[in-house]
Amino acid sequence: MELLGKTVVVTGGGRGLGRAYCESLAEQGANVVAADIRDTGNTIEAVKSAGGHAIGVHLDVTDPISCNDMANAAIEAYGRIDSLVNNAALYGDISGGRFDQISDSQWDNVMNVNIKGIWNCCRACVPSIRESGGGTIINISSLAATYGMPYALDYAMSKAAVIGMTRSLARELGRDWIRVNAVAPTAVLTEGTEEYMGEKMEKALAVIASNQALSANLEPKDMVGTISFLVSDASKFITGQTIMVDGGTTLL
Ligand SMILES: NC(=O)c1ccc[n+]([C@@H]2O[C@H](COP(=O)([O-])OP(=O)(O)OC[C@H]3O[C@@H](n4cnc5c(N)ncnc54)[C@H](O)[C@@H]3O)[C@@H](O)[C@H]2O)c1
């Protein structure tokens, strides 16, 4: 995949899947902006020690000013933005629970980070992507959105909204040659998944794998190809789509 010289912003790039995306995109020649409310030091160190280009930026996706500062830092470092990977979300940082026992504050936080956060980052980055002559936005949804996920109504709803936002933005931004797609993974073995599933993880992962045509659990390295493809010009006529990376759980 040809990513040389493309500037790609990855939100939530401090750990887990976001970090894997940063490392892989940089390895393929992209200039990476790893943006996170967490420290991004480990990501930047890993990219640089592999010979890649990356900067770390502190970002709170719920704060439009922070999002603008992030976009400005990207432009200052690399002169342009070509792609935005909206990966930041409340996932590992929240706890599951019955639908009527989710606290109001968790509900509001999940919607604020997982939905409004994407809108904020798009508002901050689209002017620069447009100025670059077009580019790509990749929004991270989840199998939870299409399959349903018990004890995670807030999370599953927020990830379903990501698909709706992707479709509307794709139609609106096509005239600027900005392609907008979503990626919906099944459970991936990350720190976030360990935190979210806790002691039930082993059993849950076995059930998830048994529902797939390809019966195994995903690792972060299994996700990077889809992201690279959607960032690259290899996916030039794909927009508004949701790509399920779920081992064949959902067959569209
Ligand atoms: N791991 C999975 O099984 C899985 C499955 C489907 C979808 N996803 C999605 O993939 C993405 C990454 O998942 P992960 O497993 O690496 O989870 P994770 O919880 O480790 O990563 C989320 C990242 O977002 C960051 N973040 C949270 N709030 C933020 C804010 N306000 N501003 C900026 N950054 C913020 C966190 O610091 C963290 O680095 C998430 O969107 C998640 O919903 C994960």
Image (cartoon, rainbow, N blue to C red):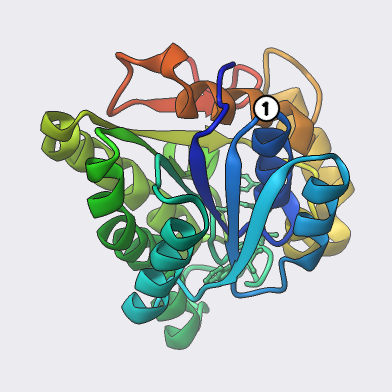
Image quarter of the C terminus: top left
The answer to whether 177 appears left or right of 120 in the picture is left
Height in image: 129 above or below 74?
above
- Residue at 78% of width from left, 45% of height from top? 204
Q: In which quarter of the image is residue 123?
A: bottom left
The answer to whether 244 appears left or right of 182 in the picture is right
Split into quadrants, the picture shows ligand 1 in the one at bottom right
Q: How crowded is mark 1: few (under 14 residues within 10 Å), some or many (20 or more)?
A: some
Height in image: 210 above or below 140?
above
Height in image: 40 above or below 3?
below
Q: Estimate the x, y position of residue 234 in percent, counting from the top left.
A: 46, 12
Identify the residue under disc 1: 28
- Residue at 85% of width from left, 40% of height from top? 50
As shown in the figure, which amino acid type bears the numbered disc 1?
A: Gln
Is residue 217 or residue 120 the one in the foreground?
120
The answer to whether 144 appears left or right of 28 in the picture is left
- Residue at 40% of width from left, 39% of height from top? 82
| Res 218 visible | no
Q: Estimate the x, y position of residue 95 in percent, counting from the top left.
A: 65, 72
- Residue at 24% of width from left, 33% of height from top? 133
